[in-house]
Image: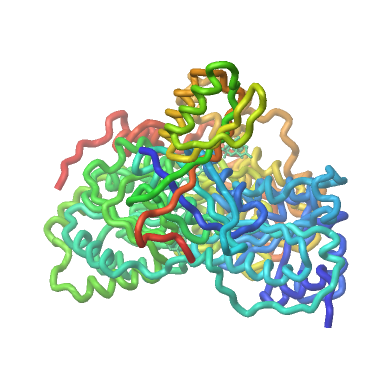
Amino acid sequence: MRHIISILLENEAGALSRVAGLFSARGYNIESLTVAPTDDRTLSRMTVVTFGSDEIIEQIVKQLNKLVDVVKLQDLTEGAHIERELMLVKVKALDHAREEVKRLVDIFRGRIIDVTDSTYTLELTGTVEKLDAFVKALDVTEIIEVARSGVTGIARGDRALSV
Amino acid sequence: MELTGADIVVRCLQDEGIEYIFGYPGGAALHIYDALYKQDKVKHILVRHEQGAAHAADGYARATGKPGVVLVTSGPGITNAVTGIATAYMDSIPLVVLSGQVPTHLIGDDAFQEVDAVGITRPCVKHNFLVKDVNDLAETVKKAFYIAASGRPGPVLVDIPKDVTAEKTEYLYPKSLTMRSYAPVNKGHPKQIKRAVDRILEAKRPIIYTGGGIVSSESAEILIELVRTLGYPCTNTLMGLGSYPADDPLFLGMLGMHGTYEANLAMHDCDMMLAIGARFDDRITGEVAKFAPTAKIIHIDIDPSSIGKNVAVEIPIVGDAKLVMKDLLAEINKRDKKPDADALKRWWTQIEKWRSIDCLSYDRDSDLIKPQYVIEKLFEITNGDAFVTSDVGQHQMWAAQFYGFKKTRRWINSGGLGTMGFGLPSAMGVQLAHPEESVVCVTGEASVIMCIQELSTCKQYDLPIKMVNLNNRYMGMVRQWQEFFYDRRYSHSYMDALPDFVALAESFGHVGMRIEKPGDVEGALRESLQLKDRLVFMDFITDQTENVYPMIAAGKGHNEMHLKPSNGEAPPERELA
Ligand SMILES: Cc1cc2nc3c(=O)[nH]c(=O)nc-3n(C[C@H](O)[C@H](O)[C@H](O)COP(=O)(O)OP(=O)(O)OC[C@H]3O[C@@H](n4cnc5c(N)ncnc54)[C@H](O)[C@@H]3O)c2cc1C
Ligand SMILES: Cc1ncc(C[n+]2csc(CCOP(=O)(O)OP(=O)(O)O)c2C)c(N)n1
Ligand SMILES: [Mg+2]
């Protein structure tokens, strides 16, 4: 099962490598990992997307909690939650593809954020599935470059991850 | 008054009440060495290799329960210490390792003797720090001690750049501290305690399986009370030996790969397993699919990640073994329901049958020195009161099987990492901690060579350790596996060109003895133990072909033990109560 784990950790040098090192040393899967400081500059928030059996996820959560830099964590997938990923795509935009891509961007509620004579740079946010579907739809033209942020997320309703 | 970083480090050690630190100097640590020179509260023990420093501090910690302290320089100083740090990590031993680092402005430049100490040690420490500002130094050292010794203990590294040890600031050592990201749970959940007691009292074929957590929580007395209150059989892991007195009839001996027949079969056939401070290591479980098929498992551990890691558990209890056992006992004593006496009687009858095959017996009429005999005699002569360290191999298993430990912290060995070379330097730490006690290092001719340089340290500090070298001229444990599983192809397990250990010991200024006949074993042990102020290296020339029995081979279940040939091929039949 796929799990999204959000982690609040001390904003210290090396905290990121402790988490990354844990996953590689213990052979856990990482699909994506994002990290940035929060409104409280002493804390970073990291979101790890991982997958594994219930037992493995339980171990991942326990091992993460055991890291001294980890203050708190939450498995978002345990409840209702919102997940988002940001994607920037540079595509060839020539001839009829110029119109076609623009139409697709509208349908997916993305934006064209940079334009040249021959290219568009597109921005899209959404779930992983939505971004995947968009990339697939872009086969009407040639993709030059894709930059994805990895997933971040937050629980719905009152459930919150804070100290 | 303002102090330099180096003085602050030493003041922190003083204020932490540290008696000994084990170290080896070098460029990046020289300011700290200079600060040590100017005081005499903290005594520095100069080892001969940084691995020895880590093992010695580790031995000190295991023998006392207090954190061991190591001081090394940057680069090769810290890399040499890594094996020792990993050894402590695997066995959950509290260490604080201080390492010098190149000055902050050179970090990342491939400077002379620069190595990323925090990066290299990350997977084998409980936590580590790089101190970049002298104003953080005292608090960081305090955190290091706090983290190392609380919860599930472990090594903590503090990497200190040279310029930080030169800068000055006001010294203030925090008395205590709290950390929002680190707060070990000590008290067991009351609901889980009640559920556990229900299970415990329902059991028909119970077993209590305990490990190193009893040692680190100093809870042997309560364990004994719990076991005796219930009348249930108890077994200890290699790391837990001494937590339950070996001569008590409720004790089944060590379990696991080289555990006793009765302990392993009782584990296999039990219907209720109460695991306390033990981590279901693969040397215990063997093939997990075949492990204790009928058991309902209760697992008490201070580290939630130990629970459910290898084996599914019915009732998990996170907490300190001592506090949880106290709560269990209180709850048991409140209940009207008592253990099922009839079932227990049947279970003990079964266990006694298993015990009666005497799985540890060996040939006592041999003309060659049997290693087991040496340990038996050692036990007798020291009355089971010595502190025994060991290296890794067959000799380690025989020491574990034949020295009947009665108290914790007397058996000091590398279980998790299995580090050859551990025995001698760890004995130094033990002897310093307990100058009046007999400290014996049971070793093998291959292992002892790995840290043999520490004989020089022993001379410098007059450490009267007794070395018991069970010299079989083989890496016996490797040879045994090759005999059993590789058709006797003894690939590189033979040690040609061994030194003359007697001459070697003498060249370091110690007493050497070679013992070749069974009849001389007892005399040699007695004579050496009487040499209270000398290190004696006893080189026992033992039977090369002896194997460690019983043995559970990899991939096998507890009911598929290799017994020694005289026990016959097929283990006796058994029936379940
Ligand atoms: C050659 C060789 C052969 C071996 N053969 C065997 C064998 O036959 N049998 C055997 O048993 N081992 C054997 N070992 C050792 C084995 O590899 C493991 O080291 C050992 O089994 C682990 O012991 P343990 O489960 O007690 O865990 P430890 O490593 O001692 O861990 C202690 C556990 O207790 C917990 N704990 C710590 N403090 C507390 C507290 N205050 N309260 C509660 N819980 C706490 C920890 O979180 C941890 O889970 C062998 C090793 C070698 C090198
Ligand atoms: C540093 C290290 N290298 C290799 C091993 C693998 N190993 C385990 S036991 C052993 C042989 C030990 O021989 P010896 O010290 O003579 O003890 P014996 O088994 O003969 O009693 C070896 C090589 C180890 N445990 N540690
Ligand atoms: Mg040997």
Which of the pair B76/A150 is nearer the observer? A150
Total marks placed? 0
Residue plotted at (67% across, 30% down): B495
Which of the pair B568/B90 is nearer the observer? B90
Report the side of B416 relative to B553 (left or right): right
Residue lying farthest to the left in this orientation:
B342
Q: Is residue B176 above or below residue B543?
A: below
The quadrant of the rendering that contains the N terminus of chain B is bottom right
Residue plotted at (45% across, 42% down): B364
Residue plotted at (41% across, 33% down): A129
Residue plotted at (39% across, 44% down): A57
Question: Is there any visible trace of residue B174 in the rendered image?
Answer: yes
Q: Is residue B293 above or below residue B435?
A: above
Q: Is residue B208 above or below residue B519?
A: below
Q: Is residue A79 above or below residue B151?
A: above
Quadrant in the picture for residue B357: top left
Which of the pair A3/B284 is nearer the observer? A3
* Residue B82 place in picture, x, y as percent: 68, 47
* Residue B371 place in picture, x, y as percent: 53, 43
* Residue B360 place in picture, x, y as percent: 39, 44
